[in-house]
């Protein structure tokens, strides 16, 4: 029997294969509720889980063969390579003052009150689509948009919800976001080799994302302008510090990457075009010098390349450890037993399969709200297994996963996105005395997009809107194939 057919056996029960994963999840949830989410500690939790799991297997050598096979799997390595490239690309765009370009546009449009709240949603979304980073969007855009919005009469809690919502919306639409990358590269085809193409997943979920965005825009316009205008002159003075119309030129590589990915062009090729285009535009227009890309200062390397890679290294290590734990579940037969039990006891129809995926994604999104990427990574193997068992197309399962994980982590009081926003706003109060103090619960019901995309996803599962199955050659089909 070769290793592909060999079963990893545990003493007592096959379900002991869940032990490493359970240890990791428990520690991660504990960190989340103590507002102490730390990627390095999460990696440590994964390592501890793998070491404990070793104590319950019959063949320790084969156990570590399975772990190492998972560490080097194509699924994990594809996501890691994409993250490293995206890290470089996103940092180049940040160096090019794209945020200042969006601020300049807002000033020229002369928006205030509710209109500014809607504009903040759009600007945060564009920044997130460009850079692929929800966390980066929140920390960057809130620094300028929140003080300006308060001065111009936006409702504080709704404005904060608009920034969070824009980050989630951009995360859902960006081919370069970690949410999209993990959701797509974790969902495998049943009838052909490979995983869901990133461009295909973005294309097929766009209609759902736009419906949720339209709902959010209406709500932001209704509720976003009940604040009091503090000082329009002060707002204009503050905004003048953060304007650069040339920053909008970096929307060109953003549009190119999105267009190429959606057209089905290889995502690595699309990103390469984006990197080259952004670099040329930035250098020629004077948005940055070559030092912003690569420089050596006092023996230390700086610039977008080094910083982009460094920003993705820790989460990449965490990803491959979780993939290794998933390989244990597969090789032991635990995953297939779990999915078989779900299909026998819970899942009776394709709707039941999708609602199970929706429920699992929601639960993980709530429990690991500290970092939505981690919730995405953890639940992805279960989503993949349920989807393959029920012949759902990987585009569909990837989209259900991606849409769910951009909901609860963006508005729960203990969510990482909310805490990041509040931390940034707190640091601004020493500079802008007029800023109100927000509580973690204030954005619970004002992050309208995140609530809307969760609701749209639920409706889609209940009524089969956009449901597609995998055909004989991996194509999308409306009806489940008969065998």
Image (cartoon, grey):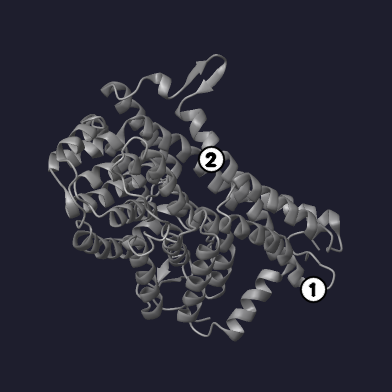
Res 9 quadrant in image: bottom right
Identify whether 471 is placed above or below 137. below
Q: Residue at x 36, y 71 (%)?
A: 455
- The residue identified by callout 1 is 13
Q: Residue at x 43, y 53 (%)?
A: 418
Residue 403 makes an appearance in the image: yes
Q: Nearer the viewer, residue 387 or 380?
A: 380
Identify whether 30 is placed above or below 430. below
Residue density around tag 2, few if under 14, some if 14–19, many if 20 or more, within 10 Å: many
Residue furthest to the top in view is 298
Assign a secondary structure to mark 1. loop
Q: Nearer the viewer, residue 287 or 320?
A: 287
Residue 384 locus on image (x, y percent): 55, 65
Residue 98 locus on image (x, y percent): 30, 35
Checking the image for residue 109, the label placed there is none
Residue 383 locus on image (x, y percent): 54, 67
State the CA–CA distance, disc 1 to disc 2.
37 Å
Q: Residue at x 17, y 41 (%)?
A: 231
Residue density around tag 1, few if under 14, some if 14–19, many if 20 or more, within 10 Å: few
Assign a secondary structure to mark 2. helix
Residue 72 makes an appearance in the image: no
Residues at circles 1 and 2 in contact by the CB criterion of under 8 Å: no
Left or right of residue 111, residue 455 in this image: right
- The residue identified by callout 2 is 312
Numbered-mark total: 2
Left or right of residue 412, residue 213 in this image: left
């Amino acid at each position: 029997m070769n290793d592909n057919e060999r079963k990893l056996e545990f003493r007592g029960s096959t379900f002991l294969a869940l032990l490493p994963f359970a240890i990791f999840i428990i520690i991660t949830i504990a960190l989340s509720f103590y507002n102490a989410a730390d990627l390095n500690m999460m990696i440590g939790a994964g390592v501890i889980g793998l070491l404990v799991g070793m104590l319950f297997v019959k063949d320790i050598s084969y156990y570590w063969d399975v772990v190492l096979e998972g560490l080097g799997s194509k699924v994990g390595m594809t996501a890691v390579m994409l993250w490293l490239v995206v890290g470089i690309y996103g940092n180049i765009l940040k160096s090019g003052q794209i945020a200042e370009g969006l601020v300049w546009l807002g000033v020229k449009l002369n928006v205030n009150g509710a209109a500014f709240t809607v504009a903040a949603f759009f600007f945060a979304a564009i920044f997130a689509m460009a850079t692929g980073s929800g966390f980066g969007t929140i920390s960057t855009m809130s620094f300028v948009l929140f003080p300006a919005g308060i001065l111009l009469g936006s409702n504080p809690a709704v404005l904060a919800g608009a920034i969070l919502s824009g980050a989630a919306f951009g995360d859902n639409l960006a081919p370069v976001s970690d949410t999209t990358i993990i959701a797509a590269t974790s969902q495998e085809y049943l009838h052909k080799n490979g995983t869901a193409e990133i461009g295909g997943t973005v294309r097929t979920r766009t209609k759902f994302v736009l419906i949720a965005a339209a709902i959010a825009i209406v709500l932001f316009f209704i509720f976003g302008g009940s604040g009091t205008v503090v000082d329009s002159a002060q707002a204009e003075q503050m905004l003048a510090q953060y304007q650069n119309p040339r920053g909008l030129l970096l929307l060109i590589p953003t549009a190119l990457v999105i267009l190429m990915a959606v057209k089905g062009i290889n995502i690595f090729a699309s990103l390469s075009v984006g990197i080259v285009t952004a670099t040329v535009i930035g250098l020629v227009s004077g948005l940055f010098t070559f030092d912003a890309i690569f420089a050596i200062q006092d023996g230390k390397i700086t610039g977008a390349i080094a910083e982009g890679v460094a920003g993705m290294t820790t989460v990449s290590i965490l990803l491959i450890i979780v993939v290794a734990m998933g390989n244990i579940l597969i090789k032991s037969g635990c995953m297939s037993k779990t999915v078989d039990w779900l299909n026998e006891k819970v899942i009776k129809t394709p709707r039941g399969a999708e609602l199970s995926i929706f429920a699992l994604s929601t639960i993980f999104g709530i429990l690991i709200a500290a970092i939505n990427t981690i919730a995405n990574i953890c639940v992805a193997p279960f989503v993949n297994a349920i989807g393959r068992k029920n012949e759902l197309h990987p585009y569909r399962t990837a989209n259900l996963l991606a849409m769910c994980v951009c909901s609860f982590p963006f508005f729960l009081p203990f969510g990482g996105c909310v805490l990041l926003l509040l931390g940034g706003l707190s640091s601004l109060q020493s500079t802008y005395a007029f800023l109100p103090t927000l509580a973690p619960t204030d954005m619970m019901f004002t992050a309208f997009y995140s609530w809307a995309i969760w609701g749209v996803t639920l409706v889609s599962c209940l009524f089969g809107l956009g449901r597609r199955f995998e055909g004989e050659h991996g194509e999308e089909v409306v009806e489940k194939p008969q065998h």
